[in-house]
Amino acid sequence: MERYPLLLLPTPSVTSPSLRPGGGDTIHAPAIAKQAELLSPKFARLESALNRRALEIRQGVDHLNTEYAIVIETYGKVADFFKAVRKIEGLEWLGEYELREITPTEDFYSSDDNRDKPLTGQIMLVLSDRRAIDELLSLWRRYGEQPNMVFNRGWAKFRDLFRLLKDIRYWSVKDRLEYSGVIGYWEQRLKDEPDEAIRFEAELWFQADSNKRELAFNNVIRLVQELDGKYLTTCCIPEIHYQSLLLELPADKVQFILKDHNVSLIKCDQVMMFRPLGQMIIDPLWSEEEETNYIPQIESSEDRKVVFEKLPRVALLDGLPLANHNDLIGNLIIDDPDDFASTYRAIDRKHGTTMASLIVNGDLKEAGKKLSSPLYVRPIMKPDNRSFDRAEAIPDSELPLDIVHRAVKRLFEGEGGEPPVAPSVKVINLSIGDPNIVFNGKMSPFARLLDWLSHKYNVLFLVSAGNHYNNIPISKTASEFRALTDDLRALEFFESLERSAWQRKLLSPAESINSVTVGAIHSDACTLTATNPSLYNLYNEEMPAFYSAQGNGYARAVKPDIVLSGGRILHREPIIGAELCPTNYAAEPGYLVAYPDLSSFTNRRYTRGTSNSTALASRGSGEICDILEELFYENNQQHNFENYASLLIKALLTHGASWGDLYNNISRYMAGADTTTIKNSVVKYIGYGKPDIDRVKYCLENRVTILGYGDLENNEAHLYKLPLPNSFGGRTIWRRLVVTLAWFIEPCPANIKYRDSALWFTLEGENKDFVARRQTSVDWMQVKRGTLQHEIFEGDDLAVLTENGTLEIKVNCKEHAKKMDKPVRYALAISLEVADTTDISLYQDVKNAIELQIIQDTKVQTRI
């Protein structure tokens, strides 16, 4: 069937936004007398903890630390409580985030018919001096004694807080140490290198006052020096409320801390959390050959004076690739301002080489075309000499956020007085994750950084969901499992994964709202042969890859956004214990990629992982960018390409996604579950589904894709009136409408709403009566929680025409977490399709109608 180019929508009219669906569950709360009974011991524990801490400070060298971090948990949400905090002098707002899956009690439960339904709540963090805490406690006591007391103007939020309060406590040493993985990290480092100093990160509470930040900074350095330690570097990014220090302590001091937490540094109230360093390690899902110290001499693309005819559109932040590998030579722009190459052996250049290979070539087994534009590569990782296999990781001389921030800033602003190195980049591939920071409802600093960078520089990040490469416990013995049929083995495997879903959450920064997060499917192009009866390919159909991290995202936003093939991993049957063990191998199945070798530049091997899926999405993004660049050039709109390309790529990358067979395959393993339960499970695995990237690059006679874009102010909307041929309406034929809206938010890190703006599309006029949303797709409310709304409508009775023969779609904008500083850019993709057996020339009819409308609009503007 003949292929046609994409179309551009006519200029929209400006109007007011439609009503935004919203509202949440109401929560039944007990009487204040009962609440006083519940809270009395909690307030007593808080006072006791603060009294002990005050005594410790008085007995210390100085009285600098006189502010305490307080954690406040509620059932339900107390909207805009940060405004009430300002009423009490000495209280400073630090932030808030969602608390999900709260078990209801006999006192707190949902007010709807289902009292057993899990509740949502809120965690709020404040910094307080003792006088402010005493004032808060006094207010609570007065309210407990006089439930009908009238609160002064601006103080009523405290009444709401007291009614819904779940817990209030002091942020303690336990919070600083036990939830970040730093204790295990310290123990492992002491085991591996008992006499070596240990580096780690100290993230401070971010304070708006720069003078207070300076005092906290100096105090932490003083406390480190008291332990004979060193301060190495710092990173402060006010826009994401992040201040952190890279520290080093002697091994004996760390050993002492592990035995006794009564150390001033560990008790420092200005420190939010101590974190492991260098944990963003690439853990390849393939085996490694014996290591050697031989370093072959290689040339870089720059040495060979490669001249690129096109500008780079995709960037890779990863390890250093082998630029002169036969599958990569002439396709990379290596930018290594930190000179990682000087200590980066060629044989160690594994992950960067495999990622570059997939972005440039795709699966080498399928021999596809190379990416038409060069791939910009900035190494941010290097081999870790301490690890047995010299795993690639962000070096321990850097704070991870600092090196990523500098790398992206260098792209678009330049560095050290030099001009930007690659401002043409529209997409950045980031296939790394922090195994110590799994998403638990709070946006991690790394995710906040990506959200801010994408907003600031108008660039799209593609982020891997993360790998969980663990043994899978099953409920059968080895002999019992061996006796099962293939279908029953797969069912046992799936049910085991469902039981351990809480251990397989997104790895930071995969929860980033502006980014497209990519998960993996258990599939590849290899043909399996039954060579080893003890190895199982547990799924014979496409299914979510067992290693791929699961969503949802922040505020139950769709995450991962999409899933692509990541490669199949085989499992070894249980030998003694009841566990299935994933195998680690360099042979197929998987994706065939370029790989470093000691003696040649032609070596290849097979790999698997969510990194693969993300690299393939980046490759697809580069291809989409080529289509857009040509489309805008032919329409004489090159300036709009530069402004909107990243958002249009974001929209189109998702536009071809659907649950398809994956929904049926997953639901087959959930027999007996209702539709809502199945859909909730499916979206956590695959988000919007598997995208058909080729599909969105062109139109057919029976399918047309039209693009729109613009900028919206608060409380404003753009109404698109798409003229349609009469042949599209009034007939009982199968039709499909797909609409995808994408934008970038400015993150508001201290606000539970987080997004500065909320955009959403609505179908207007007679189109409001759409009831034919595809049943096997994401819930119509959940699609509006992130920055990517993707919906599919289809059926034989799809009424899409208004009386004047147009399809009306409105893009709405409202400020969300704060007042919008400037208009919000967005991109819109709309596809209409009819069955290919019909006689409707849909593409040509729509194209002609759009051209006619543009002419008419031009005439009207001329008359005006």
Image (cartoon, rainbow, N blue to C red):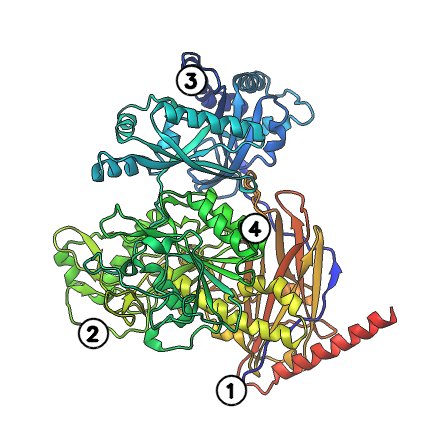
Task: Estimate how packed mark 4 is, as few (under 14), some (14 to 19) or many (20 or more) residues with alpha carbons within 10 Å.
Answer: few
Task: Estimate how packed mark 1 is, as few (under 14), some (14 to 19) or many (20 or more) residues with alpha carbons within 10 Å.
Answer: few
The image quadrant where one finds the C terminus is bottom right
Look at the numbered discs 1 and 2 and tell me whether their residues touch, using CB distance below 8 Å.
no
> Which disc is residue 468 wearing?
none
Label 4 vs label 3: CA separation?
48 Å
Disc 2: which residue: 529
> Which disc is residue 1 wearing?
1
Percent position of residue 504, x then y: 34, 50
Label 1 vs label 2: CA separation?
36 Å
Look at the numbered discs 1 and 4 and tell me whether their residues touch, using CB distance below 8 Å.
no
Q: Amino acid at mark 3?
A: Arg
Q: Amino acid at mark 1?
A: Met
Q: Amino acid at mark 2?
A: Thr
Q: Within the image, what quadrant is residue 614 found in?
A: bottom left
First-in-chain label (1 vs 2):
1
Disc 4: which residue: 417
Q: Nearer the viewer, mark 4 or mark 3?
A: 4
First-in-chain label (2 vs 4):
4
First-in-chain label (3 vs 1):
1
Q: Nearer the viewer, mark 3 or mark 1?
A: 3
Look at the numbered discs 3 and 1 and tell me whether their residues touch, using CB distance below 8 Å.
no
Task: Estimate how packed mark 2 is, as few (under 14), some (14 to 19) or many (20 or more) residues with alpha carbons within 10 Å.
Answer: few
Q: Nearer the viewer, mark 2 or mark 4?
A: 4
